[in-house]
Amino acid sequence: MLKASYRKYILHFKEPSGTSRGVLREKETYYVRIWDDADESLFGLGECALFRGLSADDRPDYESHLQQVCRQIHRWETLPLEGWSSMRFGIEMALADLRQGGRRICFPSSFTAGVAGIEINGLIWMGDRELMLQRIQEKLESGFRCIKLKIGAIDFESELDLLKYIRRRFGKQEVELRVDANGAFAPEIALTKLEALAKYDLHSIEQPIRQGQWKEMARICALSPIPVALDEELIGVEDEALKEELLTQIRPQYLVLKPALTGGFSGAEAWIRLAERRGTGWWITSALESNVGLNALAQWTYGLKNPLPQGLGTGLLYTNNIPSPLYLAAEKLYYDPERAWDLVSIV
């Protein structure tokens, strides 16, 4: 019979990371172990990557519900996980790992064999102008051909200057530029800002206005000179009919899917099916998971064969991340099957 346990873990950022919602210094997460009681030494490991302030399941009873889920893991097919996106993500991950022999290989492929990588975007966190400029230079020098800038925290003219700096050095054929506003623009001025941003040949803008304003977002998607990608808009939308209604009404150009926030792997796959039925583009993004969650997410993402650069993290954000086989080379994330995991601190 299956058994499960969990452990809370606090990840510490190497340096404060800014978004339009505030500055992040630490992140809470939960590791889940699932095993068959016939052999406890063989276990699947998952990460319930709760994102306080953003996850739809950021609730006071989170830990008590996770305890309940672990007690009922023997009937995992009927677990009470609706509305608990990050838990579904962790449980699906741990079960996939267990099915593959408990080796932290959830989705075997050329990626886990170490012979193929995943192209990712270089993420530039918000900061003052000089700090962001320094980070942009580092990413360009590292070989990234797709760069994503978080915008909406410093003054808008400085953000335009940063984009201008990149475009003076690299055309759109050389470097793809994405921006993520995290809902920072007011609906009444969003299109004016998008017109100013469009001068710099951007690939897309994520979540220009705050989520939940479907009518305004639909207007922006229809009129924007830059393709619009929905991100936070998708969080907490788990009902299939509501997903259909959202896509039909808003008609975005892209979806940005974070499985920890959008119903686990199964929930993200449902969004992908609906998007492809409509000809809507999509890519996968991590949600500040540790290397445990990032590992499974990267393996799953590779299997989707999406040709766009993905928004996967690099495992370098935290001082106390879990040492893993993941590594970065130029603009690609790789898995080295010869590198061992170090799980002493979490299991």
Image (tube, helix red, strand yellow):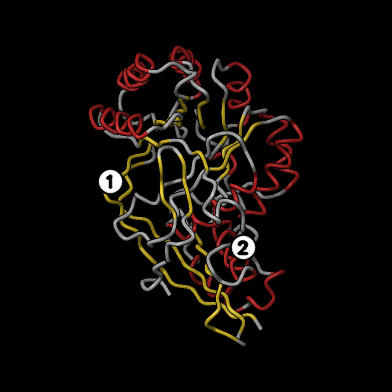
Residue 126 is situated, as x and y percent measured from the top left of the image, at: 33, 35
Using a 10 Å C-alpha cutoff, classify the residue at mark 2 as few (fewer than 14 neighbours), some (14 to 19) or many (20 or more).
many
Residue at 49 percent of width and 18 percent of height: 173
Q: Nearer the viewer, mark 1 or mark 2?
A: 2
Tag 2 residue: 92
Element on which disc 2 rests: helix
Front residue of 154/276: it is 276
Residue 96 vertical position relative to residue 279 in the rendered view, above or below: below
Residue at 60 percent of width and 86 percent of height: 37
- Earlier sequence position, callout 1 versus callout 2: 1
Q: Which mark is residue 16?
A: 1
Residue 214 vertical position relative to residue 262 in the rendered view, above or below: above
Residue 133 vertical position relative to residue 222 in the rendered view, above or below: below
Residue at 46 percent of width and 56 percent of height: 336
Quarter where residue 91 is shown: bottom right
Element on which disc 1 rests: strand
Residue 210 vertical position relative to residue 59 in the rendered view, above or below: above
Whether residue 181 sits left or right of residue 74 in the image: it is left
Mark 2: amino acid: Glu
